Image (tube, helix red, strand yellow):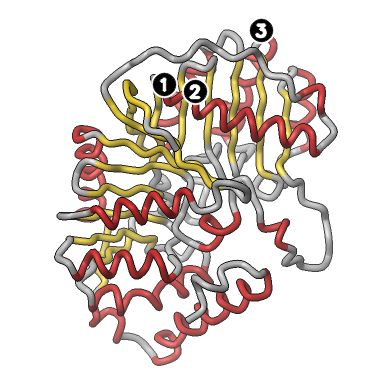
Amino acid sequence: MRWRDGNALTLLRNGAEYFPALLAAIDAARAEILLESYLYEADATGRLVSARLMRAARRGVKVSLLLDGFGARDLPAHLVRAFERAGVRLLLFRPETRSFLPSLRRQRLRRMHRKLAVIDGEIGFAGGINVIDDLNDPGAQVPRYDYAVRVLGPLVADLRDAMAIQWRHTCWTQLKQDWSHLPKHFPAPARQGEMAARLARRDNLRHRRDIEHSYLAAIAQARHEIVLANAYFLPGLTLRRALLAAARRGVRVVIVLQGQIDQPLLHYATRVLYRPLLTAGVEIHEYVAGFMHAKVAVVDSHWLTVGSSNIDPFSLLTAREANVEARNLQLAAELRADLQSRIDSHSIAVTHTTLNTGPWWRRALPWLAYQLVRGLLGLTGYGRQEYRE
């Protein structure tokens, strides 16, 4: 997780800004396209991205597409065959095996949740946006709320190295050794700006807690403000205590969470945390305009992170994740302003009064959901220390 100077990062809001930038880079590719995604739907967006990838492969670009075996388990067979005919090398990370019995095997929970792309070793993308329509949610009326960044400069080499390692490892585990060869290393990307940035990733080997430690360091160093937006938010004890400590020492802590019920169990379990956070002075806002998928934060208007990692047991304990961090006043101000606009126009503030309204059984749901999450974590062996209370 080395900091790299000389980068230019562009904030991309939702698929409306992300996909045109990604497609332009794919169309300009000369030698190599690496693309990772957790979800990959055969909707209008998926078909468009697929067509551009296949067109690139036909003109001689080496296209390597890595999708998660659970997130992309319903990828249509006709699309898989089309990729094969065009020369797109498609791999599924830990393919799902069909079974009538549910499985809580630890290995089954270790998913590839990253959303990364690198083209010709020159331009990179990272964030939380899957290859899926912005409106591909039940009953969605407005685009899914999410972020990514386009990266130019020395950090692109770190993105490519991380993707190349994962690609080669997956090739070898699936007996595709002939696919493990990627084009030779590209020249080191030239300086493109003045931003200091780094890649923070999580895996199940040497980088198990890198993303969590990045958050903890930023929170511990905060002096004025922490603004955090996360679609799935159920931190363990260490992160919770860090946020509470920041609020108690006078830091303004603002958390934007999903207001729509997307994952019911996690949605209600998260609400167990509301009361102690509010009591400590933390501001909580629920985004209600549509579905939220963002995983970003800004600290003291100069440090920011944009990536795939939620602050929940799945992302912090089991999944492969990737966040890009930067230290830059202009980019941090841009992200913070966008977050503030979402709070002002599309969110509802949570208060103690909010928590005390409604029938008793609805107020009991959070406690029951949290106990169920703890029980499931106990069965899998994950998070025993962080979710022990």
Question: How packed is label 2: few (under 14 Cα within 10 Å), some, or many (20 or more)?
Answer: many
Tag 2 and tag 1, C-beta contact below 8 Å: yes
Q: Which amino acid, mark 2?
A: Ala
Hey, which residue is sitting farthest bottom in the picture?
Answer: 360
Specify the quadrant of the image occupied by residue 240: bottom left
Question: How packed is label 3: few (under 14 Cα within 10 Å), some, or many (20 or more)?
Answer: few
* Label 1: which secondary element: loop
Q: Which residue is more in the foreground, 45 or 68?
A: 68
Question: How packed is label 1: few (under 14 Cα within 10 Å), some, or many (20 or more)?
Answer: many
* Label 3: which secondary element: loop
Tag 3 and tag 2, C-beta contact below 8 Å: no
Q: How many marks?
A: 3
Sequence-wise, which precedes: disc 3 or disc 2?
A: 3
Question: Residues under labels 2 and 1: Cα distance?
Answer: 6 Å
Looking at the figure, which quarter contains the N terminus?
A: top left
How far from the left and from the top, in percent, is residue 353? 23, 82
Residue depicted at 60% across the width and 25% down the height? 34
Question: What residue sits right under mark 2 in the picture?
Answer: 157
Residue depicted at 68% across the width and 74% down the height? 379
Q: Which amino acid, mark 3?
A: Arg
Q: Is residue 300 left or right of residue 17?
A: left
Question: What residue sits right under mark 1 in the picture?
Answer: 154
Q: Which mark is residue 326?
A: none
Question: What residue sits right under mark 3 in the picture?
Answer: 59
Circle 3 or circle 2, nearest the eye: 2
Residue 215, above or below 358: above
